[in-house]
């Protein structure tokens, strides 16, 4: 039986799997589905960024230029969100995000469309904002743990020094 609904649907993956299917379907209509080729930039460090993308297929690499050194921050796989901060606090991108597979299928929403979604259905908007806030909290915890491990490693190296 063919699907009579012509609009594409957001799959229940990653952070968005926490949304009710009706909210996910409604949210999908505010964004666009796109395929990006290998090497395409999703975001450029230091450039204005006002979109959030959900990785549907493929892999993205997150790189940061820190005082001339390129730091590999993360590899993002299907289900990952990228740019979620820009929907809430629109500033320059803090890293480069590049397609690191043959291609990447993404669903992307612009800040203006996100704001329209929130205004149209505040109850659904609260669900989406909770999901985004949960993802941001998860990232903060991961980064805090990483920094703590780094401090502990430095302290251990210092204590192991023979004076």
Image (cartoon, rainbow, N blue to C red):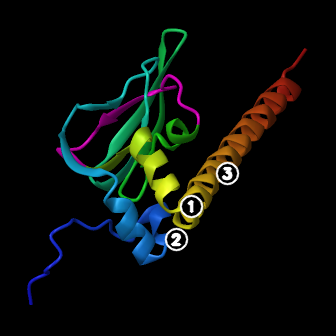
Residue at 49 percent across and 70 percent down: it is: 19
Q: CA distance from mark 1 to mark 2?
A: 17 Å
> Is 77 in front, or is 21?
21
Q: CA distance from mark 1 to mark 3?
A: 22 Å
Q: Earlier in the sequence, mark 1 or mark 2?
A: 2
Magenta range is: 89-105
Observer able to see residue 111 = yes
> Is 96 in front, or is 92?
92
- Image: 151 above or below 36: above
Which residue in the structure is indicated by mark 1? 122
Question: In the orientation shown, which residue stands out farthest toward the front?
Answer: 120
| Callout 1 touching callout 2 (CB < 8 Å) | no
User: Residue 78 appears in which quarter of the rendering?
Assistant: bottom left
- Image: 17 above or below 132: below
- Image: 35 above or below 9: above
Q: Secondary structure at mark 1?
A: helix
| Eye-nearest disc, 1 or 2 | 1
* Residue 72: image location, x then y, percent: 46, 31
Which residue in the structure is indicated by mark 2? 18
| Callout 1 touching callout 3 (CB < 8 Å) | no
Q: Earlier in the sequence, mark 1 or mark 3?
A: 1
Q: Secondary structure at mark 3?
A: helix
Q: Secondary structure at mark 2?
A: helix
Residue at 37 percent across and 66 percent down: it is: 26
* Residue 27: image location, x then y, percent: 39, 61
Q: Quadrant of the N terminus?
A: bottom left
């Amino acid at each position: 039986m063919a699907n009579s609904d012509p609009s594409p649907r957001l799959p229940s993956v990653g952070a968005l799997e926490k949304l009710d299917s009706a909210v996910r379907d409604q949210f999908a209509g505010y964004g666009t589905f796109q395929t990006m080729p290998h090497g395409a930039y999703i975001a450029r460090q230091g450039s204005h960024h006002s979109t959030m993308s959900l990785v549907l297929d493929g892999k993205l690499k997150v790189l940061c230029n820190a005082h001339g050194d390129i730091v590999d921050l993360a590899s993002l796989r299907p289900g990952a969100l990228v740019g979620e901060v820009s929907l809430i606090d629109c500033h320059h991108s803090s890293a480069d995000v590049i397609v690191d597979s043959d291609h990447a299928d993404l669903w992307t929403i612009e800040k203006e469309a996100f704001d329209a979604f929130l205004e149209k259905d505040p109850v659904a908007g609260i669900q989406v904002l909770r999901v985004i806030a949960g993802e941001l909290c998860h990232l903060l915890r991961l980064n805090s743990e990483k920094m703590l491990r780094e401090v502990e490693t430095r302290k251990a190296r210092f204590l192991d020094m023979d004076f």
